[in-house]
Image (cartoon, grey):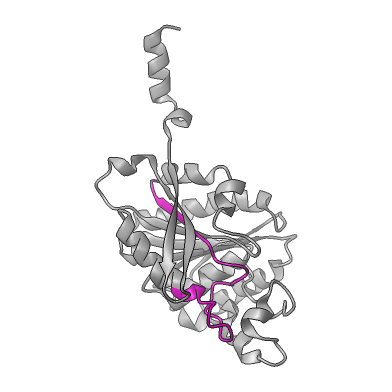
Amino acid sequence: MNLKSIILLLLLSPSLTLASKVDTLMVQSESMNKSIANVVITPNSYSSQKEPYDVLYLLHGAYGNHKDWITKVADVAKLADQYNVIIVCPDGGYNSWYFDSPIQPEQRYETYISKELISAIDNEYKTNPNKNARAITGLSMGGHGAFYLSFKHQDVWGAAGSMSGGLDIRPFPNNWSMSERLGSYAEHKENWESNTVTNMVHLLDGLNLSLIFDCGVDDFFYGVNKTFHEKLLERNISHDYIERPGKHNWEYWTNAIKYQMIFFDGFFKSDG
């Protein structure tokens, strides 16, 4: 093979030409008085494209951090190139469940992500600040967080997803530090009732937020996902719901994010 042929091969090979960039952006949270790390993945076109980008916020699960997605799912960076979007992976703290804790004033991850981080990303990167150019999803605790944040802030996100999400936290009163954030269920029932996603369906009108969620049938969250799907059907809230073989693990989420990216790509291209 001569030199000309080798150069042509390099230019035509997608696996060699795709070169998304992975950065860590530190954002000062005034609400929690600390600096928080966030992974930001920009696509290969970022330095040359003048048009602003759509943004997907991708949340980690319990006991995780902002590096989980990029270190445990090798294809995540490639997805930024494939769909020409910016992907932001925030650090959601130690089992924060992505809400502002009613009993721990230093835990304010709802405020951080929906206001402080959004503002920082839009100021730092070439983004389209319209809600129809912004989506959010996550796994497990992050699935709950994505729905929780988007349901409460439909002016911020136009589409939301959940993978193996804890969409009803009430059946798990002793798990994942939730009692530290909300108080015990026995003594602080109202905190649990008002902060579980399944009780927030009344905030939806079926028009302002595009939804997709999925769960493996062997997952301990399968029951609450199926029930949530049935609840949306009863309320006539449009959504995409998928259940398939799978457990609560990275093998499942590595597959799930690929399907959800197809959904979000369609949303972005339709302008919501």
Towards the viewer: 125 or 14: 125
Dividing the picture into quadrants, the one containing residue 206 is: bottom left
Q: Position of residue 17 (x, y in %)?
A: 42, 30
Decide if residue 112 is on the left or right side of residue 122: right
Decide if residue 251 is on the left or right side of residue 68: right
> In the rendered view of the protein, which quadrant contains the N terminus?
top left
What is the residue that sits farthest to the left in this orientation? 50
Looking at the image, residue 184 lies above or below residue 156: below
Residue 272 visible in image: no
Decide whether residue 93 is among the magenta residues: yes
Looking at the image, residue 12 lies above or below residue 1: below
Residue 197 visible in image: yes
* Majority secondary structure in the magenta region: loop
Q: Residue at (40%, 12%) from the top-left corner?
A: 5
Decide if residue 236 is on the left or right side of residue 189: left
Decide whether residue 145 is among the magenta residues: no
Q: Residue at (70%, 66%) from the top-left corner?
A: 222
Looking at the image, residue 30 lies above or below residue 218: below
Q: Position of residue 140 (x, y in %)?
A: 63, 64
Q: Position of residue 272 (x, y in %)?
A: 36, 63
What is the residue that sits farthest to the top in this orientation? 2
Towards the viewer: 26 or 42: 26
Q: Position of residue 252 (x, y in %)?
A: 66, 52
Q: Which residues are magenta?
A: 84-111
Q: Residue at (57%, 77%) from the top-left corner?
A: 197
